[in-house]
Image (tube, rainbow, N blue to C red):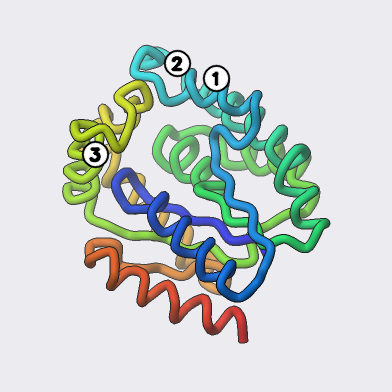
């Protein structure tokens, strides 16, 4: 099973990834947790470039190609082998983020993105995508507070520096995708408390396990 978590900055993906991992571990399942960008050694080098505030002049096309390079390596080295071993793979961001950030928001050609994805995905698609939806005003406040208290690295804050309008478009993009792919997407209100969000996720996972 392949589960991905999506959402804007400060939506709580990293916390809920760990929660989902523990949910399956308690059921004696083999679980692999990973993320994009940065799920491989090569990916971690690409992550430094992609998320660094020093990369603010990175062109939209260069940004796209770096994300796709990270994904290609990630699939080959981590995701596909784990799925072939019948592990449950839980990934913090996957191709939906690229569609939203690089096409819906940045304006790059979706057909180009889909063509390259078709070449590298080898038919791999998440079985379940949990979208943690939160008002960008709330999400950005959370994200910036986490940077200040050390939970997030300031060296990975390039997207937090984007405008509120940018993040509002990100939210719109994810919600549009969720409606288009409503069988795969489950939308969770991430403005709730961590415990309330986890209860909503449990309900989703229990149905999946059944």
Residue 53: x, y in percent? 34, 18
Q: Element under label 1?
A: helix
Is residue 192 depicted above or below 167 in this figure?
below
Give the Cα separation between the discs numbered 3 and 1.
Answer: 28 Å
Give the Cα separation between the discs numbered 1 and 2.
Answer: 6 Å
Q: Look at the image and tell me in which quarter the C terminus lies.
A: bottom right
Q: Is residue 48 left or right of residue 7?
A: right
Is residue 76 depicted above or below 161 in this figure?
below
* Mark number, residue 85: none
**Badge 1 density bin: few <14, some 14–19, many ≥20, Cα 10 Å:** few
Given residues 111 and 149, the one toward you in this image is 149
Residue 200: x, y in percent? 37, 76
Callout in the foreground (3, 2): 3
Q: Mark 3 — residue?
A: 146
Could you tell me which residue is drawn at 50 percent across and 48 percent down? Answer: 92
Could you tell me which residue is drawn at 47 percent across and 56 percent down? Answer: 17
Q: Mark 1 — residue?
A: 62
Given residues 155 and 51, the one toward you in this image is 155
Given residues 102 and 69, the one toward you in this image is 69
Query: Can I make out residue 176 in this image?
Result: no
* Mark number, residue 58: 2
Could you tell me which residue is drawn at 20 percent across and 35 percent down? Answer: 149
Give the mark nearer the N terminus: 3 vs 1.
Answer: 1
Q: Look at the image and tell me in which quarter the N terminus lies.
A: bottom right
Disc 1 and disc 2 in contact, CB within 8 angstroms: yes
């Amino acid at each position: 099973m392949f589960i991905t978590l999506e959402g804007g900055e400060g939506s709580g993906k990293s916390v809920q990834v760990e929660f989902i991992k523990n949910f399956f571990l308690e059921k004696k399942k083999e679980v692999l947790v990973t993320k994009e960008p940065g799920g491989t050694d090569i990916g971690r080098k690409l992550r430094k470039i992609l998320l660094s505030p020093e990369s603010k002049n990175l062109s939209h096309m260069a940004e796209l190609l770096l994300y796709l390079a990270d994904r290609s390596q990630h699939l080959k080295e981590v995701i596909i082998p784990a799925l072939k071993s019948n592990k449950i793979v839980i990934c913090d961001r996957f191709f939906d983020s690229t569609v939203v950030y690089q096409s819906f928001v940045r304006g790059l050609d979706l057909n180009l993105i889909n063509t390259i994805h078709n070449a590298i995905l080898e038919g791999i698609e998440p079985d379940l995508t949990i979208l943690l939806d939160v008002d960008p005003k709330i999400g950005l406040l959370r994200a910036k507070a986490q940077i200040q208290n050390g939970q997030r690295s300031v060296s990975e804050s390039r997207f937090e520096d984007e405008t509120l309008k940018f993040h509002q478009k990100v939210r719109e993009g994810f919600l549009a995708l969720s409606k288009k792919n409503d069988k795969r997407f489950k939308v969770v209100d991430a403005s709730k408390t961590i415990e309330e969000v986890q209860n909503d996720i449990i309900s989703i996972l229990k149905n999946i396990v059944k």
